[in-house]
Amino acid sequence: MDTTDADYFITICCKLRGTNQIALPAIAEELLETIEHRNKQGGWYAHIALVMPDHVHFLLSFPESETRMQIIVSKWKEWAAKTLKIAWQRDFFEHRLRQEESFREKADYILANPVRAGLVKEPEEWPYVFITETY
């Protein structure tokens, strides 16, 4: 499947839901650093990544590559599990945005997640977010 012209809404959840396991300064900052690192390395292009207490949301696109998207994301999960001791659920949710779907609507949905969860009053207050300059 050619993913070079596609954007994906991806959610990766921790095994134990409802408990803050990853929205902790040391862990969240390390996750965001590796997301940015993988952008620079060209493994994926994260437009937005947001770390919540028990899951991570992404808007990602992928370069033309022999490596499938599922493998790219799974390798990141594996790194986080081994390095940061995060217990993830087995799979992840992925949704390829269709042309009629608004990229901006999905981005706004992701950024408003901490507000909906009652963690902050305004999206800008949430510290655990990565947004590319081109967004």
Image (tube, rainbow, N blue to C red):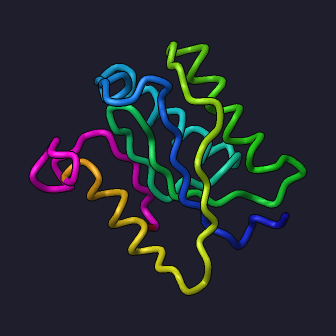
Residue 76, percent from left and from top: 64, 33
Chief secondary structure of the magenta portion: loop
Residue 115, percent from left and from top: 19, 52
Query: Which residue, as the protein is rendered here, is positioned at the far right?
Result: 66
Q: Name the image quarter holding the C terminus.
A: bottom left
Query: Which residue, as the protein is rendered here, is positioned at the far left?
Result: 121
Q: Is residue 50 magenta?
A: no
Residue shown at 16%/41% (left/top)? Answer: 119
Residue shown at 63%/23% (left/top)? Answer: 79
Residue shown at 26%/58% (left/top)? Answer: 112
Using the image as rendered, state which of residue 5 and residue 112 is in the foreground: 112
Residue 133's place in the image compared with 38, above or below, is below
Residue shown at 21%/53% (left/top)? Answer: 116
Number of numbered markers: 0
Q: Is residue 29 visible?
A: no
| Magenta residues, start to end | 116-134
Using the image as rendered, state which of residue 75 and residue 95 is in the foreground: 95
Q: Is residue 123 magenta?
A: yes
* Apparent side of residue 110 relative to residue 37 in the rendered image (left or right): left
Residue 35, percent from left and from top: 53, 40
* Apparent side of residue 119 relative to residue 105 in the rendered image (left or right): left
Residue 104's place in the image compared with 42, above or below, is below
Residue 40, percent from left and from top: 61, 46
Q: Is residue 32 visible?
A: yes
Residue 30's place in the image compared with 123, above or below, is above
Q: Name the image quarter holding the N terminus.
A: bottom right
